[in-house]
Image (cartoon, helix red, strand yellow):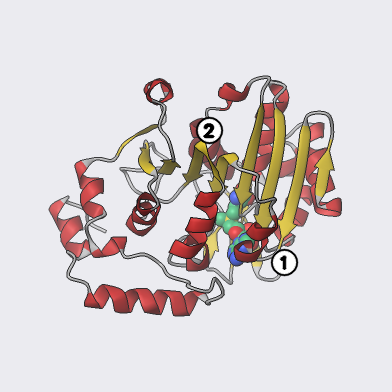
Amino acid sequence: MSELKEVLTRDGSITLRSLFFQENFHSLEGAFKETEIKFINPSDLKRFKGKSLNVLDICFGLGYNSASLFSNLIRQNSFLNWYALEIDKKPLEYSLRNKLFQNLWDLKVLKILESLCKNYVYKDKFFECEILWGDARERINNIPANTKFDLIYLDGFSPQKCPQLWSVEFLEKVTERLSNNGYLITYTSSAAIRKTLRGFGLYIFNLKPNKISNNSWSNGTIAIKKIDEESLKRNLFFEKLSLMEEEHLLSKASIPYRDPNLNSNANDIIKKRVQEQLLSNLKTSKKWREKWGMTK
Ligand SMILES: C[S@@+](CC[C@H](N)C(=O)[O-])C[C@H]1O[C@@H](n2cnc3c(N)ncnc32)[C@H](O)[C@@H]1O
């Protein structure tokens, strides 16, 4: 735990700060709240009441996103086939020992998490779960090739801090795993990530903002392969990109992160991107921010 520090967030739930990545695992507004707002609500889990679904949680961390997913699915008798990718076991070991974390979940959710920590798998009549420990760039290859996901949660540290998990090459592997009507959900509204995902033919939506987001216009991004107009009309949580966001995708901020052999370190990926930005004729993101009256 030496490189992880405990942080209490404003909704009373705990999170961690990674000294290595120099970033918190969650927003200071609330770890639990962030999970609900940025991942669970837009998942529209009621669609799967009494039905089966496949979910992939990339960057499992302390387990908030999946604990909340499990909790909701247990209540509605869904059948879940679930995989997670995570490089470090310490966050889960930590959350399972923490009273504030334990108090959030019922016994069955805690039992699943305990089993994932100890045995890496959990199985009962409704749930079949497996966590693959190690670098997500490699371990994603260990998920059976024919498994496509209805929901993929992508919750790595920010692209500037952990570009390995936001490269064109990794995102392509992730996109290949998305089912036709599946939702790829992430908290980032980075132009580079949105443009990369759109480049794979996905439809990109903005996760509507509220108080919790660091910027006032977005809570993240949802990418979908095939849109079903009816469910889009029903959904309350995402919307088409605004003109401002579309123009963001035409600025240098949209230059992607590249990791051709899926084994580069963060510094090399960032350096390569800065070089590409310097050579690009696209509008600078400073100009884009000035046009839209952003101070940051
Ligand atoms: C923002 S935290 C995730 C928070 C988590 N979703 C939760 O609900 O607690 C980012 C996580 O990414 C993990 N991570 C960093 N690099 C990774 C990699 N290359 N492969 C897999 N996981 C990685 C970190 O160990 C950390 O747990």
The number of numbered badges drawn on the structure is 2
Q: Position of residue 197 (x, y in %)?
A: 40, 52
Nearer to the camera, 75 or 105? 75
Q: Tell me the amino acid under the disc marked 1.
A: Met
Q: Which residue is mark 1?
A: 1
- Ligand 1 picture quarter: bottom right
Discs 2, 1 touching: Cβ within 8 Å: no
Mark 2 and mark 1 lie on one chain; the one further toward the N terminus is 1
In the picture, the quarter occupied by the C terminus is bottom left
Quick check: 238 left or right of 99?
A: left
Q: Position of residue 146 (x, y in %)?
A: 65, 46
Q: Is mark 2 within 8 Å of ligand 1?
A: no
Q: Position of residue 2 (x, y in %)?
A: 70, 71
Q: Which residue is mark 2?
A: 43
Nearer to the camera, 6 or 62? 62
Quick check: 18 left or right of 111?
A: left
Q: Residue at x 38, y 36 (%)?
A: 210
